[in-house]
Image (tube, helix red, strand yellow):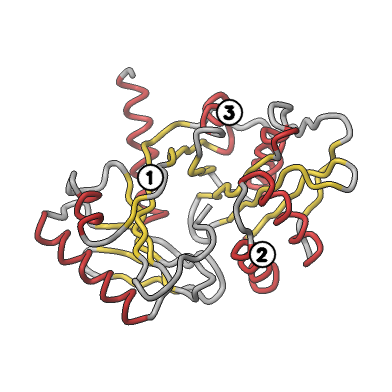
Amino acid sequence: MNDQTTAHREELLAVFDREMREQARPDGPGVRVERTADVVRLVGTDHDWNGVVWSSPDLDAARADAAIAAQVAHCTALGSGEFEWKLYAHDRPADLGARLRAAGFVAGEPETLLVAPVADQPRTVRLPEGVRLRGVRDEADVELMARAHEQAFGSDSSRLRHQVLARLRDDPDHFVGVVAMAGDEPVSSARMELYRGTGFAGLWGGGTVGAWRGRGVYRALVAFRAQIAAERGYRYLQVDATEDSRPILQRLGFTALGTTTPYVYRPASRPPRPGHRA
C-alpha cells in the first residue's frame, strides 16, 4: 500500500468515524441517540438495533472496563433482549474485544467496512435477462423483500419486516428498498439508509438466492442504489460486507477500511432475537 493509498484510506476512515459514529443520528423512527463521556449508543425498542456505535479513541483499560460495565447495567435496566457493542478493528484499547468477552458479550462474525465515493460508482443498471427491479413501497413489497432475504441468508426476517414497515410509514424519504424479481419470484433484495445530516448512504441486506448468484444481480442492486444516492446529493456509500460480497465491492472500487465485529450481550433471562443489524 503506497503513501497516497494509505492517506486516502485514513481520510475516509476519519470522515466515517466522525460522521457515522461519534456524531451518530437515530437510525430509525423512535430510536434515540445517547451520549456519555466514553460511548455513543443507539436505543430503541426490542425490534430496533440497540448498541454502542462509537467509543472514545483514548480509552485505557480502566475506562474501557467501566464503560463496558455501564452498558451491561444499561441493558439490564432497560430489560432489553440484547445489546450490541459494534467494535471496529482500530478501536482502543487493542484488547477491547477480549474485555467485552470477559464481561459476557459474544462475538459474531466479523465483516469488512467498505466505503466508496458515490461519484466513482457506475450507475448503469444491467440485469440478467428475465429479471426486473421492483421498489419497496408497501406491505406486499416488504413481504417479497423478506422472502428473498430468508432464501439468500437462511435467517428469520421478522425483525427486518418490522423495521422496513416502520421506515416506510414514518421516514420514507431516507429509505430505499428494492427487490429483484424473476417472473413472480423474488431472487434478490437490498435496502439503503440515507443518513440525514451526513454525506453517507448505507447499503444493507444485499443478498441473492443461490441459483441467481454470479449473474450480476448484486452489482445491479449496488448501481441502482448508487444512482439514487447521487441524485440525493450523498457523497459516500458505506457497506459492512460479508466475505461473499467484499470481493465484488472491491472490484467496484470500494476501499476496505478495516473490519467490524458485533459483540452481543444478552441477559440470561431473555432468549436471542432473530437476526442482527445486517
Q: Residue at x 38, y 66 (%)?
A: 83
Local SS, label 3: helix
Q: Residue at x 69, y 73 (%)?
A: 169
Q: Are marks 3 and 1 in contact (CB under 8 Å)?
A: no
Q: Position of residue 267 (x, y in %)?
A: 34, 71
Name which residue type carries label 2.
Arg
Q: Which mark is residue 19?
A: none
Local SS, label 2: helix
Spatial CA span between label 3 and label 1: 18 Å
Quadrant position of residue 61: bottom left
Residue ID for mark 1: 260
Residue ID for mark 3: 248
Would you say 208 lies left or right of 35 here?
right
Q: Quadrant of the N terminus?
A: top left
Name which residue type carries label 1.
Thr
Residue ID for mark 2: 161
**Label 3 Cα crowd, 10 Å radius (few <14 / some 14-19 / many 20+):** some
